[in-house]
Image (spheres, rainbow, N blue to C red):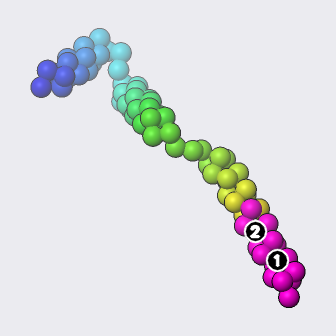
């Protein structure tokens, strides 16, 4: 309850001072949400899209090598 009251008091002060417009509020809220998102992603230790793409390429390459080795082993056994 006290935290929500604190936030409301801050917004009230901003309105009283006449420094806030709709655009300013929306930009500030978006900035806060983006920073919180970044914190959560950092804590979860998620990989970026580029890292995932690189790992997928490595996996595909390794799968091809495994298939080739299996084929050569079958050919050597016969």
Farthest-out residue, left: 1
Magenta-drawn segment? 62-78
Q: Is residue 78 above or below residue 65?
A: below
Predominant secondary structure, magenta span: helix
Tell whether label 1 touches label 2 (CB within 8 Å). no
Q: Residues within 10 Å of mark 2 (few under 14, many from 20)?
A: few
Q: Quadrant of the C terminus?
A: bottom right
Task: Give me the residue at 59% from left, 44% from top.
Answer: 48
Q: Residues within 10 Å of mark 1 (few under 14, many from 20)?
A: few
Residue 4 seen anywhere in this rendered image of the structure: yes
Q: Nearer the viewer, mark 2 or mark 1?
A: 1
Task: Give me the residue at 29% from left, 11% from top.
Answer: 17
Residue 2 place in picture, x, y as percent: 14, 20
Q: Which residue is mark 1?
A: 73
Q: Quadrant of the N terminus?
A: top left
Report the side of 36 relative to 63 (left or right).
left
Q: Which residue is mark 2?
A: 66
Residue 49 place in picture, x, y as percent: 62, 49
Label 2 element class: helix
Q: Is residue 55 above or below residue 38?
A: below
Cα distance in 3D space between marks 2 and 1: 11 Å
Residue 39 magenta-drawn? no
Task: Give me the residue at 57% from left, 44% from top.
Answer: 47
Indicate which disc, 2 or 1, sits on the residue closer to the N terminus.
Answer: 2
Q: Is residue 16 above or below residue 38?
A: above
Residue 64 seen anywhere in this rendered image of the structure: no
In front of the other: 18 or 58: 58
In front of the other: 50 or 10: 50
Residue 10 place in picture, x, y as percent: 25, 17
Q: Quadrant of residue 72?
A: bottom right
Q: Quadrant of residue 8?
A: top left
Residue 29 place in picture, x, y as percent: 37, 31
């Amino acid at each position: 309850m006290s935290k929500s009251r604190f936030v409301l008091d801050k917004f009230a002060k901003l309105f009283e001072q006449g420094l806030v417009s709709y655009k300013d509020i929306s930009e500030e809220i978006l900035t806060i949400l983006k920073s919180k998102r970044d914190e959560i992603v950092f804590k979860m230790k998620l990989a970026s899209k580029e890292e995932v793409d690189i790992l997928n390429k490595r996996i595909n390459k390794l799968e091809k090598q495994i298939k080739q080795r299996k084929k050569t082993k079958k050919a050597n056994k016969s």
